[in-house]
Image (tube, rainbow, N blue to C red):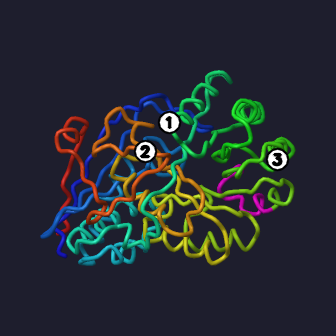
Amino acid sequence: MKLAGFELRRVAMPLVAPFRTSFGTETERDILLVKAVGDGPDGWGECVAMSDPLYSSEYVAAAVDVMCRFLIPALGQAGIGSAVAVGEALEPFKGHRMSKAALEMAVLDAELRLEERSLARELGSAADRVPCGVSVGIHDSIPALLDAVDGYLGQGYVRIKLKIEPGWDVEPVAAVRERFGDGILLQVDANTAYTLADTRQLAKLDAFDLLLIEQPLPEDDILGHAELAQRVSTPICLDESITSAQVAAAAITLGATSVINIKPGRVGGYLEARKIHDVARAHGVPVWCGGMLETGLGRAANIALASLPGFTLPGDVSASSRFWARDITEPWVMADGRLTVPQGPGLGVAPLPDVLDEVTTWTQFVPLA
């Protein structure tokens, strides 16, 4: 495969409802898409960086800059022709994993389309369908939260994740358990909002039989998570802290996590995500696929990843309608609380040209030479 360059494209996608977490509220996503262009089929990638550096240090404008200034020129100099070569060529550049992941995803999609192989098969899929969980943001009131959860359960979601923060934790969790009972799979996500000083408050969540508490402490506090895991009975799941297979292995060894949320964009791509899956599975640690409010492109890749055998917990692989009134691909629609793993070449999906043009706010082609 010989690549000519990458088309970078920013699209503006309004959310169907505001999505509030401990680090902010989103009403619209400014999404950077990447298209690998060469002598074969085009390949698509999606950068999951947000508009502001709140979830991580990366943000959309910086992703555009680092791709144009450093990453794409480095790929040109290396003469890359495969997705594996992308990671090798970009390894000298520190950080910027979401940008690297988007470029790798685009090349991987193009490569697999050319070879007429699916991403699911390439990663090692073991299922035709994957169960769907939904992430429920922080609401203005308990009744509003209960109405939202009721709606998602009615749609068929098999697992509920509640975003929490100091002042919005025990009470909403208790209300959901009381209203819907012990039969629903329930977990919480703090997005680094607590410190070890909050251990007593977090321990109160043990009463509600949660699947896990996701990323309660700051991402760099691995030892703090290990200590917290000794003080609470609810399993600790790491998200932001896990940036590579090496870090995953260290966190498991230290006892900092007994469940891992794998987000491909956060770890530098789907090939590294597979390595983390393999490390966790070797240690008997369950994993699940996190979401970053992706379009149908990123959602297709996440569904493929979530079909690997170690993904034994429902992930944040929601239907398109969870976030978008209209997706840029054919919409992902749940059936019986599950989504079908794409089997077509590459991602198995592509943008709808008319819809893509309508939401595009900026585009630029960056040649490799």
Disc nearest the viewer among 1 and 3: 1
**Badge 3 density bin: few <14, some 14–19, many ≥20, Cα 10 Å:** some
Residue type, mark 3 in image: Asp
Q: Secondary structure at mark 3?
A: helix
Q: Which residues are magenta?
A: 216-226
Identify the mark at residue 50; answer none if there is no mark.
none
Residue 343 place in picture, x, y as percent: 32, 63
User: Dividing the picture into quarters, in which one does residue 366 lie?
Assistant: bottom left
Mark 1, residue position: 155
Residue 103 place in picture, x, y as percent: 33, 63
User: Dividing the picture into quarters, in which one does residue 137 lie?
Assistant: top right
Vertical comparison of 344 with 12: above or below = below
Residue type, mark 2 in image: Met
Question: In the rendered view of the protein, which quadrant contains the C terminus?
Answer: bottom left
* C-alpha separation, residue under disc 2 versus residue under disc 3: 31 Å
Are the two marked residues, 2 and 3, in contact with CB atoms closer than 8 angstroms?
Answer: no
Give the residue displayed 83% in from the left and 43% down from the top: 207
Residue 117 place in picture, x, y as percent: 28, 72
Residue type, mark 1 in image: Gln
Position of 61 with respect to 239 (left or right) is left
Position of 155 with respect to 347 (left or right) is right
Mark 3, residue position: 206
